[in-house]
Image (cartoon, helix red, strand yellow):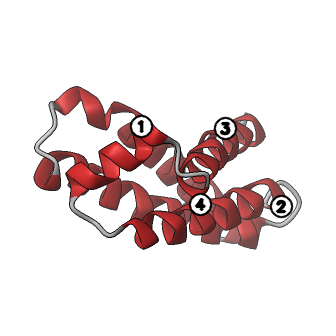
Amino acid sequence: MMTIIQVILAVFILVGGFIKLFRLPFQVEHWQHYQYPLWLMSVIGIVELIGAIGMIGGIWNPYLVFVSGVLFVILMIGAIHAHIFRAHQPIGMIIPATICLILSMMVIIWNFKVFS
């Protein structure tokens, strides 16, 4: 079950990373609402790709999944903050980031138990 959650989370974050790296027009428009520089969008995209690869690699290595989970929690808290406080978007806009945040926390908790 946890492997399925890891794959879903990795795919979702991977798609988001590619959207940022390829600077798709709708993402650039969102990023301008957040009032962050566009170079940061590329940095976040690269970090998301690295985290997604780590999440998939975490299927075989619990340390990778744990680190990727922590990285995703940090990214999703930042995403929620950007949607609500920087862009003043409706609460519905944070649903994807909130789901990813919850899944990331589940992965961290599950793997913390593995280390114990």
Question: Disc 2 to disc 3, how far (Cα)?
Answer: 13 Å
Identify the residue under disc 3. 5
Report which residue position mark 4 lands on.
48
Label 4 vs label 1: CA separation? 18 Å
Give the CA separation, mark 2 to mark 1: 30 Å
User: Residue at horizontal 23%, vertical 46%?
Assistant: 83
- Which residue is rendered at x = 52% and y = 43% of the image? 24
Q: Earlier in the sequence, mark 3 or mark 1?
A: 3
CB atoms at circles 3 and 1 under 8 Å apart?
no
Three-letter code, disc 3: Ile
Name the residue furthest front. Answer: 25
**For discs 3 and 1, the disc positioned in front in the rendered view:** 1
- Quarter of the image with the C terminus is bottom right
Q: Nearer the viewer, mark 4 or mark 3?
A: 4
Element under label 2?
helix
Please tell me whether residue 74 is drawn above or below residue 79 in the rendered image: below
Contact between marks 2 and 3 (CB within 8 A): the answer is: no
User: Mark 4 or 1, which is nearer the eye?
Assistant: 1
> Would you name the residue on which mark 1 appears?
26
Q: Quickly name the residue at label 2.
A: 57
Q: Amino acid at mark 4?
A: Glu
Q: Is residue 102 left or right of residue 66?
A: left
Q: Point out residue 12 in the picture as x, y percentages from the top left corner.
A: 61, 39
Residue drawn at the location 53% of the way across and 53% of the way down: 20
Disc 4 vs disc 1: Cβ atoms closer than 8 Å? no
- In primary-sequence order, the first of circles 2 and 3 is 3
Q: Nearer the viewer, mark 2 or mark 4?
A: 4
Residue 99: mark in rendering: none
Work out whether mark 2 precedes mark 4 in sequence or the reverse, and give the earlier one. Answer: 4
- Disc 2 crowd rating (10 Å Cα; few below 14, some 14-19, many 20+) is some
**Spatial CA span between label 4 and label 3:** 16 Å
Q: CA distance from mark 3 to mark 1?
A: 27 Å
